[in-house]
Every structure is written in structure tokens, then in C-alpha cells.
């Protein structure tokens, strides 16, 4: 099983195996054809991990456009709350939702979110028969939801800290680059780099830092090299 990204975050193979075990356990214990971990990818919602259970019509990688899809998971993501649909066929709101085409007429799902509150997706189970789900099953799925969400939070924070560490390392590297004595020509003011090549000051600074240059002229040089412009400026003051 290869690593798959959460946004820009890679999920380690060992965590994917744990998530696969979770959906397999849920499908087996509750006795349903499908247990899923769904995730949002751009404008779509994707089957991220699917239980390896009999009669499961969902495959990892299956996608649907999320907004306006009418899927059970769309409501879970919008409300950020649990959704229980015992029998979609007898419920006017759900009788035409796309999962019915796969004969999935009952649903129980919870939202999964990132630490910043943005939605990651859902964890859910679906059945091809009427199912009210017991309180024990509801609490079981909620427990697994909490475990998965804690792992998402750790991965998310590790990614954030990794980016901050990289920025800090880059800044320290720039400081070290400019630290110490630079060999500079006493006449043309070019700088000699570590390879022995002489570069203009602008080129050296641009190459070793994120700084850039906008050229201007100081008053002393204006007076020495462009005296007529200097006089004009003085007259205008």
C-alpha cells in the first residue's frame, strides 16, 4: 500500500494500514457491506480507504463532485455533525440520493476535520438494508473517528512545523553565507566566491540571499558623475 497525500501531507504506510484495519473491523462487527474513510480533493469527495468486505460497491479512488451531489457525506461535511439515515427509501429527503443507485439505503457517518477547522472528509458505514444502528455501534464509530482525527492532527502539525523549520534553516543559511570577511576587489568592488570567481556585488547577494536590487544613485555620486542634473535639482529646491 503506497503513501497517499492529505492535501500536501503524505500519510505514512503504517497509518494507512491502521485505517484499513479500522474500516475492515467496522464492516465486520456492524455487519454492513461498506465502511469508508472519505476525503475532499479539490472540488470532489473521494473514497480514500474502503473496507475489504463482501458486496462493497465502493473502490478506493472513486470520486464524485461534492457540492450539490446529494450524497450523505455532503450533509455531514456541511453540518460538521453525525448523520444517521436508517432508511433512505422511506425518507423524502434521501430517496433520490446517488448512493441509492448502489443500493446503499442506510448510512451512519461522522465528520473528519483538520486542526484549523477545515473539513478533511468523513468516516462512515453504509448498508443495503434498513439499519437503525445501535448506540454501541454509534459510539464505536465515534471512537475510531477520534483516533483517525488525532492522527490527522499530528500529521498536519508535523507538516506545519516542518515548513517552519525549513524557513528557519534557510534564514540561518543566509546569515552564515553573509557572515565573516568577504574578499572584495579594492577597485571594482566585485566579490570572490568560494569557487574563485569574481562577481558583482548585486549578483553575489542575489545568488546567496532572497534579496533583490533596484538601482538608484546617492547624492554624492550624482554630484560627481552628473553635475548638470545635480545643479538642476538644486535649482528646483
Image (spheres, grey):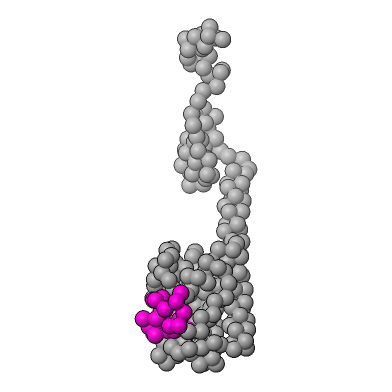
Residue furthest top as drawn: 235
Quadrant position of the C terminus in the picture: top right
Name the spot of residue 233 as percent of width and height, x first.
52, 11
Name the spot of residue 178 as percent of width and height, x first.
59, 43
Name the spot of residue 230 as percent of width and height, x first.
51, 12
Q: Say whether residue 227 is visible.
A: no
Specify start and end residues of the magenta stretch as a single range. Answer: 88-106
Quadrant position of the N terminus in the picture: bottom left
Q: Say whether residue 8 is visible.
A: yes
Q: Is residue 158 above or below residue 37?
A: above
Is residue 103 found inside the magenta-colored segment of the image? yes
Residue located at (39% from left, 81% from top): 100
Q: How many marks do you count on the picture?
A: 0
Q: Is residue 141 above or below residue 229?
A: below
Q: Is residue 145 above or below residue 217?
A: below
Is residue 224 found inside the magenta-colored segment of the image? no
Residue located at (61% from left, 65% from top): 115
Residue located at (49% from left, 9% from top): 232
Name the spot of residue 10 as percent of width and height, x first.
50, 70
Residue furthest left as drawn: 101
Residue 25 occupies quadrant: bottom right
Residue located at (49% from left, 65% from top): 7
Q: Nearer the viewer, residue 98 or 13?
A: 98
Q: Nearer the viewer, residue 211 or 65?
A: 65
Q: Nearer the viewer, residue 35 or 184?
A: 35
Amino acid at each position: 500500500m503506497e503513501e497517499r497525500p492529505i492535501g500536501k501531507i503524505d500519510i505514512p504506510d503504517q497509518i494507512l494500514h491502521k485505517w484499513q484495519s479500522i474500516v475492515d473491523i467496522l464492516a465486520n462487527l456492524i455487519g454492513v457491506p461498506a465502511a469508508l474513510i472519505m476525503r475532499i480533493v479539490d472540488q470532489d469527495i473521494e473514497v480514500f480507504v474502503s473496507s475489504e468486505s463482501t458486496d462493497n460497491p465502493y473502490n478506493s479512488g472513486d470520486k464524485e463532485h461534492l457540492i450539490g451531489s446529494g450524497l450523505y457525506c455532503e450533509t455531514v461535511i456541511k453540518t460538521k455533525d453525525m448523520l444517521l439515515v436508517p432508511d433512505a427509501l422511506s425518507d423524502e429527503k434521501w430517496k433520490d440520493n446517488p448512493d441509492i443507485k448502489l443500493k446503499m439505503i442506510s448510512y451512519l457517518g461522522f465528520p473528519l476535520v483538520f486542526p484549523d477547522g477545515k473539513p478533511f472528509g468523513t468516516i462512515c458505514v453504509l448498508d443495503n438494508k434498513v439499519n437503525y444502528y445501535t448506540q454501541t455501534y454509534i459510539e464505536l464509530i465515534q471512537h475510531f473517528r477520534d483516533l483517525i482525527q488525532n492522527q490527522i492532527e499530528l500529521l498536519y502539525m508535523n507538516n506545519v512545523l516542518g515548513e517552519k523549520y525549513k524557513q528557519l534553516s534557510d534564514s540561518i543559511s543566509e546569515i552564515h553565507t553573509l557572515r565573516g570577511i568577504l574578499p572584495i576587489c579594492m577597485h571594482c568592488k566585485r566579490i570572490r566566491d568560494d569557487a574563485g570567481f569574481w562577481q558583482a556585488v548585486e549578483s553575489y547577494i542575489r545568488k546567496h540571499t532572497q534579496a533583490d536590487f533596484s538601482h538608484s544613485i546617492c547624492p554624492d555620486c550624482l554630484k560627481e558623475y552628473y553635475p548638470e542634473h545635480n545643479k538642476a535639482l538644486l535649482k528646483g529646491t
